[in-house]
Image (spheres, grey):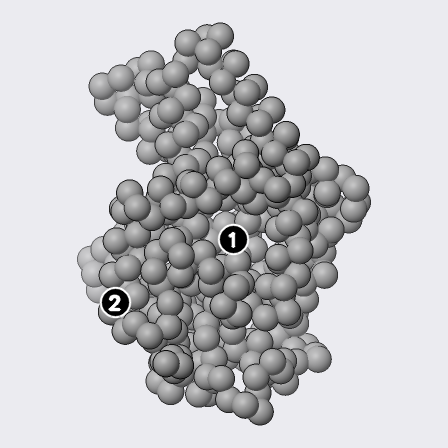
């Protein structure tokens, strides 16, 4: 049962159930053809009952993300060549580029910081440093130190996510849920928010106190400018690279950060304990119930069209652009940060649920829908008492 650790009324949250007791959206989807089940697991974030853990192949994942990045850039450049209706390809190109850039940062750099991307500590460190330079973000070594603090307490005032939301978007305790929503939406389109975010990125890379990171970031920028200047590809550079990895990447980051953690009630006997931390994250899953089989043919046909349209036009883009990689199962990562099953997080999480969450006093919880997850986070944030 949902308790008051999140907030008093949270009808959208429920405990995650062991496989034999499961019902609801993902269980219903098991009636669809078996060939679709891996795809549905990726979209929803929850595995089918009989899914098994495949062998992790992190280097193949890295190659896939790099290929996605190159494909996105190529499609955007092609759209500029086609012009006219060809500009519509920019939507696809930008989407692939943002998806790849977010996976590079949120998945690959993140797990390199835990030294469990490939399990090769030196390779992970080398990879994390160069991706951080490419994306013009905080030094990998500085990020690794800050991220350790994040796992000790993800809700401290100086936590990386809490601080970013407060300083860039003005999202902090003391505001109503409605005001928090307004600030997020305004931030998505605010030049001030994006300017602050971009300045933070430039300061933490090209002007970093980590001289090695500063050098790597400078070399990456010089290489880009040299290549673009040689071919006089300035328009393509701005449209195919700078726009998605600055503006769109930052929009995706803001939305994800607003759904990343809840703020449990700071009860004295629970503060800093496992029960408190377990309630600070929930699984964020996507999908709709299947249309009922007992409907008249015309209604059922229409409902199936809407069901597939919502899957393809809402949930797939969310997974591609915002809830990338294992982020839908972020609660599993916080319970098991050193485990190398990040590529199979949905299945690993369900196995932990089936085993009755060993070592943790409360079950996993889940919410269906990204916007519901954001609303849940904002509601919990609005209920935090502010000390005057």
Residue count near mark 2 (Cα–Cα under 10 Å), binned few <14, some 14–19, many ≥20:
some
Residue that label 1 marks: 42
Q: Is residue 284 above or below residue 190?
A: below
Q: Quadrant of residue 272?
A: bottom right
In the depicted view, which residue is nearer to us: 56 or 262?
262
Provide residue 237's location: percent of width, then percent of height.
Answer: 41, 21
Q: Quadrant of residue 300?
A: bottom left
- In front: label 1 or label 2: 2
In the depicted view, which residue is nearer to us: 37 or 6?
6
Residue 106, visible in the rendered structure? yes
Q: Classify residue 24 as left or right of residue 117.
A: left
Q: Residue at x 59, y 63 (%)?
A: 150
Provide residue 45's location: percent of width, then percent of height.
Answer: 51, 59
Residue count near mark 1 (Cα–Cα under 10 Å), binned few <14, some 14–19, many ≥20:
many
Provide residue 316's location: percent of width, then percent of height.
Answer: 41, 49
Q: Is residue 1 above or below residue 244?
A: below
Q: Residue at x 42, y 63 (%)?
A: 259
Which comes before the other along the chain, label 1 or label 2? 1
**Which mark, by number, is residue 88?**
none
Residue that label 2 marks: 179
Q: Is residue 276 above or below residue 269?
A: above
Q: Classify residue 204 as left or right of residue 194.
A: right
* The C terminus: image quadrant: bottom left
Q: Is residue 373 above or below residue 57?
A: below
């Amino acid at each position: 049962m949902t308790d008051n650790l999140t907030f008093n009324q949270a009808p959208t949250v429920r405990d995650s159930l062991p496989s034999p007791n499961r019902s609801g959206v993902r269980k219903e989807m098991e009636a669809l053809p078996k060939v679709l089940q891996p795809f549905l697991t990726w979209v929803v974030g929850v595995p089918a009952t009989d899914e098994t853990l495949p062998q992790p192949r992190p280097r193949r994942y890295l190659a896939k993300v790099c290929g996605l990045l190159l494909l996105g850039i190529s499609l955007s450049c092609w759209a500029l060549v086609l012009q006219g209706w060809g500009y519509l390809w920019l939507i696809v190109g930008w989407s692939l580029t943002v998806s790849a850039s977010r996976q590079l940062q949120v998945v690959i750099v993140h797990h390199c910081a835990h030294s469990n991307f490939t399990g090769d500590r030196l390779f992970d460190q080398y990879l994390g440093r160069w991706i951080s330079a490419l994306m013009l973000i905080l030094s990998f070594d500085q990020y690794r130190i800050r991220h350790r603090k994040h796992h000790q307490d993800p809700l401290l005032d100086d936590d990386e996510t809490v601080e970013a939301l407060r300083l860039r978007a003005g999202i902090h305790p003391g505001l109503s849920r409605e005001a928090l929503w307004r600030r997020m939406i305004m931030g998505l389109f605010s030049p001030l928010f994006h300017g602050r975010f971009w300045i933070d990125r430039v300061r933490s890379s090209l002007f970093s106190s980590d001289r090695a990171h500063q050098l790597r970031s400078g070399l990456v920028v010089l290489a880009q400018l040299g290549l673009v200047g040689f071919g006089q590809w300035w328009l393509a550079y701005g449209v195919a690279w700078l726009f998605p990895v600055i503006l769109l990447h930052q929009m995706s980051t803001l939305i994800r950060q607003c759904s990343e953690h809840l703020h449990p009630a700071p009860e004295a006997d629970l503060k800093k304990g496992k029960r408190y931390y377990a309630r600070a994250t929930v699984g964020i899953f996507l999908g709709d119930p299947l249309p009922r089989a007992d409907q008249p043919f015309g209604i059922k046909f229409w409902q199936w069209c809407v069901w597939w349209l919502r899957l393809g036009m809402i949930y797939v883009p969310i997974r591609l652009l915002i809830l990338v990689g294992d982020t839908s199962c972020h609660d599993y990562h916080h319970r098991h940060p050193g485990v190398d099953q990040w590529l199979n997080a949905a299945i690993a999480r369900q196995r932990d649920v089936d085993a009755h969450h060993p070592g943790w006093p409360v079950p996993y919880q889940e919410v269906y829908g990204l916007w519901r997850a954001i609303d849940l986070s904002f509601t919990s944030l609005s209920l935090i008492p502010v000390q005057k």
